[in-house]
């Protein structure tokens, strides 16, 4: 078995003649909190889409907890232990906050049709456990008090937190967060940083996040991958990334010759 919970080796995809992601390798051990950064259009979300099966990778291979997930559908990859949030929030707006999390918990249940219709003791017991689990996850982000609210009525920051709760409900080994701090104010970002650390420690996850807020990335990420035009150009600690001339060039452009 791989030593990494996520081991993506040499993955890539091209749309026509454009290489949106090329020869990307990510190796994330248990308990790690890594980041991925790059200018707009660098291929970060494309990388997430490859890892989660939204796009089939045209090169390389992807292992989740040692299991090859190449060619699997997104729901199969989620069942294998990898879950994600999205850059654009994709909650079930008409459903309650609680039901948004409960529906994700069903990824790990085994109801039969007959048991569901008859409401057997096993079915009732599983549903009771699912509700308790959903409330527990909501409480991590202080959302348990809003359990009966429609998801669409939550403030933007709480919708972001709810989406993370829903991803956690699938019991992932690896959690991918796509710009979780987008649209948050400084106070909300600080609270989010603490919550991300808490869920990593509490649930023993490996976490990879895409984020444009460099302050947040440098504060909480142990290692960072930098993409530019679909290609990885740097990997290292926050200090190494800050001092890397290729990273500065990617963000600021080539220096003007004297």
Image (cartoon, grey):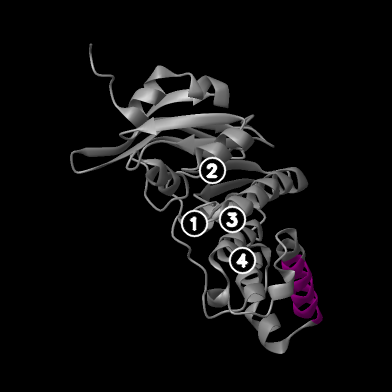
Residue 207 in the image: x percent, y percent? Answer: 61, 42
Query: In 3D space, how far apart are the residues under numbered discs 3 and 1 (Cα atoms)?
Result: 30 Å
Residue identifier under label 4: 104
Q: Nearer the viewer, mark 3 or mark 1?
A: 1
Q: Is residue 237 visible?
A: no
Farthest residue in the bottom direction? 118
Residue identifier under label 1: 183
Q: Nearer the viewer, residue 180 or 163?
A: 180
Q: Quadrant of residue 96?
A: bottom right
Q: In the rendered view, tell whether residue 73 sits above or below residue 225.
A: below
Residue identifier under label 2: 209
Q: In the rendered view, tell whether residue 52 sits above or below residue 146.
A: above
Q: Nearer the viewer, residue 108 or 145?
A: 145
How packed mark 1 is, by other alpha carbons closer than 10 Å (few <14, some 14-19, many 20 or more), is few
Return the disc, 1 or 4, that comes first in the chain's sequence. Answer: 4
Bounds of the magenta segment: 121-135
On whether residue 66 falls in the magenta region, the answer is: no
Q: Nearer the viewer, mark 3 or mark 4?
A: 4
Residue sitting at x 64%, y 29% = 3
Return the disc, 3 or 4, that comes first in the chain's sequence. Answer: 3
Q: Nearer the viewer, mark 2 or mark 3?
A: 2
Q: Quadrant of residue 167?
A: bottom right
Farthest residue in the front direction? 258
Q: Nearer the viewer, residue 71 or 184?
A: 184
Residue sitting at x 34%, y 24% = 249
Most common SS among magenta residues: helix
On whether residue 130 falls in the magenta region, the answer is: yes
Residue 116 in the image: x percent, y percent? Answer: 68, 82
Query: In 3D space, how far apart are the residues under numbered discs 1 and 4 (Cα atoms)?
Result: 25 Å
Q: Which mark is residue 79?
A: 3
Query: In 3D space, how far apart are the residues under numbered discs 2 and 3 (Cα atoms)?
Result: 20 Å
């Amino acid at each position: 078995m791989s030593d990494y919970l996520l081991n993506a080796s040499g993955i890539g995809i091209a749309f026509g003649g454009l290489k949106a992601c090329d020869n990307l390798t990510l190796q994330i051990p248990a308990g790690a909190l890594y980041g991925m950064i790059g200018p707009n259009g660098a291929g970060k979300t494309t990388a997430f889409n490859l890892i989660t099966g939204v796009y089939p990778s045209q090169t390389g291979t992807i292992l989740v907890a040692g299991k090859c997930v190449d060619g699997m559908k997104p729901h199969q990859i989620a069942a294998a232990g990898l879950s994600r949030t999205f850059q654009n929030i994709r909650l079930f707006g008409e459903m309650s906050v609680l039901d948004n999390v409960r529906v994700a918990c069903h990824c790990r249940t085994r109801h039969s049709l007959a048991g569901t219709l008859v409401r057997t003791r096993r079915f009732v017991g599983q549903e009771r456990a699912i509700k308790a689990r959903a409330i527990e996850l909501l409480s991590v982000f202080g959302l348990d008090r809003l359990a009966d609210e429609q998801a669409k009525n939550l403030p933007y920051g709480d919708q972001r937190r709810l989406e993370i709760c829903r991803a956690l409900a699938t019991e992932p080994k690896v959690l991918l967060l796509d710009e979780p701090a987008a649209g948050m104010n400084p106070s909300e970002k600080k609270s989010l940083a603490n919550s991300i650390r808490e869920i990593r420690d509490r649930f023993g996850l490996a976490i990879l996040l895409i984020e444009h807020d460099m302050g947040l990335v440098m504060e909480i990420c142990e290692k960072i991958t930098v993409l530019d035009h679909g290609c990885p150009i740097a990997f290292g600690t926050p200090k190494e990334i800050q001092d890397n001339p290729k990273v500065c060039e990617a963000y600021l452009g080539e220096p003007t010759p004297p």
